[in-house]
Image (cartoon, helix red, strand yellow):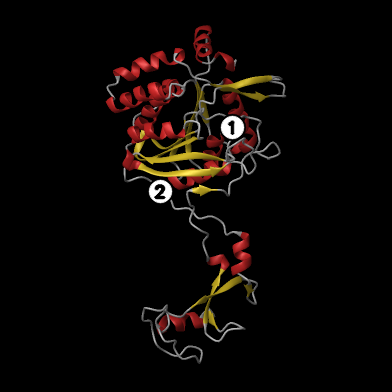
């Protein structure tokens, strides 16, 4: 069964998630931006502006975490954090908070699992070094650059329009599904500019063997072989002729291969993602939640690093984009967030999107008595 947890992901991971039980982890944690993020509601349940989450970390609210890290005997991680305490005191409390959670996320990940950390330049360079210690440098796979906006004005510096996504595996034998993008319309227009009698779009490909190599020598459609020969043996050429795949182009003199667009895969997905637009206020999927990411972004990650039936975990699930994408792609999922607003929003989002087709899921961590409500309030008082 799928699960949605209300609570601090550190506590939820320790108390509810077993070792090596998750196939894919994606997190989009707060970036230590030193600000609060608001969400606006206008319905029967809530008609106000509320703080969705705080993104301010101080030495006061991480003292317990600091003490615990010191007792874990993780010498490399502790040494790194002590350096950051001196050279980057503004980042130190946040990095202590994240270190404990990264250790737990590594614990719950299967040996074949993958981990994606979404961040921006505010903390990315610090988080990368911590991830190198937790996941090991040899398991770093990619830094993905996502172009999150096309227009941005920054005084006295280049416009900041991208986020970073660090991709790690737990071990070398990790799940990977190579992805292809759709063809660029401009590429199709410039290369696939022929149509056959059935209406299929195609382009002509060269059949001549390149210089410096020796091909096959035989006559083809009345043409003598070129100096280096043809690319393919004669029996394959005869098959293609029977299939109508070889002809002399109208303005050509040499036989060419007809390569159809509907049989051609798109380009392999690269580590710069500029083809997934961000969420704007007019977008159909916009929920009004701060830092909401497009569903297509999470679908790409989930398709690349998991299969149907696998379990996907998001430890800072916010408005539930990861959960939504996992549900759509037939993955099991675990969502965790400390904000009751986020949990309510996800429940409504899933119901509105999938209706009666929604798979069963269980919500855990909601207060059942006065004491549990007080404890939850202590963790995140501004969320109530």
In this view, 374 is above or below 274: above
| Front residue of 92 and 250 | 92
Asked if residue 263 is positioned above or below residue 282 in the image, the reply reads below
Mark 2: secondary structure: loop
- Residue closest to the far front: 156
- Residue at (40, 35) in percent of width and height: 128
Who is closer to the viewer here, 331 or 205? 205
Q: Look at the image and tell me whether residue 21 can be seen.
A: no
- Residue 285 place in picture, x, y as percent: 65, 38
Residue placed at 65% from the left, 34% from the top?
352
Task: Give me the C-alpha separation between circle 1 and circle 2.
Answer: 27 Å
Where is residue 236 drawn, in percent x and y?
43, 80
Q: Nearer the viewer, residue 142 or 234?
A: 142
Within 10 Å of disc 1 (Cα), the crowding (few <14, some 14-19, many 20+) is some
Kindly indicate the quadrant of the structure image that contains residue 199. Answer: bottom right
Could one spot residue 184 in this view of the protein? yes
Percent of width and height locating residue 78 = 32, 23
Asked which quadrant contains residue 147, the reply is top right
The reply, left or right, for residue 16 in relation to residue 76 is right
The residue located at (53%, 18%) in the rendering is: 366
Determine whether the residue tagged by mark 1 lies in a helix, strand or loop.
loop
Please tell me in which quadrant of the rendered image residue 63 appears. top left
User: Where does the C terminus fall, quadrant-wise?
Assistant: top right
Give the mark nearest the N terminus, 1 or 2: 2
Rendered image: mark on residue 381: none
Would you name the residue on which mark 1 appears? Answer: 291
Residue 29 drawn at (x, y percent): 50, 29
Foreground mark, 1 or 2, reads 1
Q: Are marks 1 and 2 in contact (CB under 8 Å)?
A: no
- Reading the image, the residue beneath label 2 is 176
């Amino acid at each position: 069964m799928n699960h949605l947890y209300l609570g601090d992901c550190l506590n939820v991971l320790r108390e509810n998630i077993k070792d090596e039980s998750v196939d894919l982890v994606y997190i989009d944690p707060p970036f230590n931006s030193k600000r609060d993020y608001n969400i606006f509601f206008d319905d029967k349940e809530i008609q106000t502006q509320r703080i969705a989450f705080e993104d301010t970390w101080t030495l006061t609210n991480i003292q317990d975490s600091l003490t615990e890290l010191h007792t874990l005997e993780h010498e490399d991680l502790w040494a790194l954090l002590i350096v950051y305490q001196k050279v980057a005191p503004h980042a130190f409390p946040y990095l202590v908070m994240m270190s404990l959670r990264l250790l737990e996320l590594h614990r719950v990940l299967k040996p074949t699992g993958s981990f994606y950390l979404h961040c921006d330049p505010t903390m990315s360079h610090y988080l990368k070094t911590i991830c190198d210690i937790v996941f090991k440098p040899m398991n770093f796979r990619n830094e993905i650059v996502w172009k999150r906006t096309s227009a941005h004005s920054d005084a006295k510096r280049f416009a900041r329009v991208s986020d970073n996504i660090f991709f790690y595996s737990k071990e070398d034998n990790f799940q990977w599904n190579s992805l292809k993008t759709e063809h660029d319309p401009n590429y199709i227009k410039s290369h696939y500019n022929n149509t056959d009698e059935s209406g299929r779009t195609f382009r002509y490909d060269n059949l001549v063997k390149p210089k410096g190599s020796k091909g096959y020598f035989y006559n083809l459609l009345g043409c003598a072989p070129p100096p280096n020969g043809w690319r393919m043996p004669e029996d394959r050429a005869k098959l293609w002729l029977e299939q109508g795949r070889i002809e002399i182009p109208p303005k050509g003199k040499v036989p060419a291969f007809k390569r159809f667009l509907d049989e051609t895969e798109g380009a392999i997905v690269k580590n710069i993602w500029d083809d997934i637009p961000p969420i704007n206020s007019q977008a159909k999927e916009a929920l009004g939640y701060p830092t909401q990411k497009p569903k297509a972004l999470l679908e790409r990650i989930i398709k690349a690093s998991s299969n149907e039936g696998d379990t996907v975990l998001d430890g800072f699930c916010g408005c539930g984009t990861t959960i939504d994408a996992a549900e759509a792609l037939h993955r099991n999922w675990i969502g965790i967030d400390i904000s009751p607003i986020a949990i309510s929003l996800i429940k409504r989002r899933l119901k509105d999107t999938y209706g009666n087709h929604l798979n069963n899921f269980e919500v855990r961590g909601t207060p059942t008595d006065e004491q549990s409500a007080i404890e939850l309030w202590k963790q995140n008082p501004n969320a109530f």
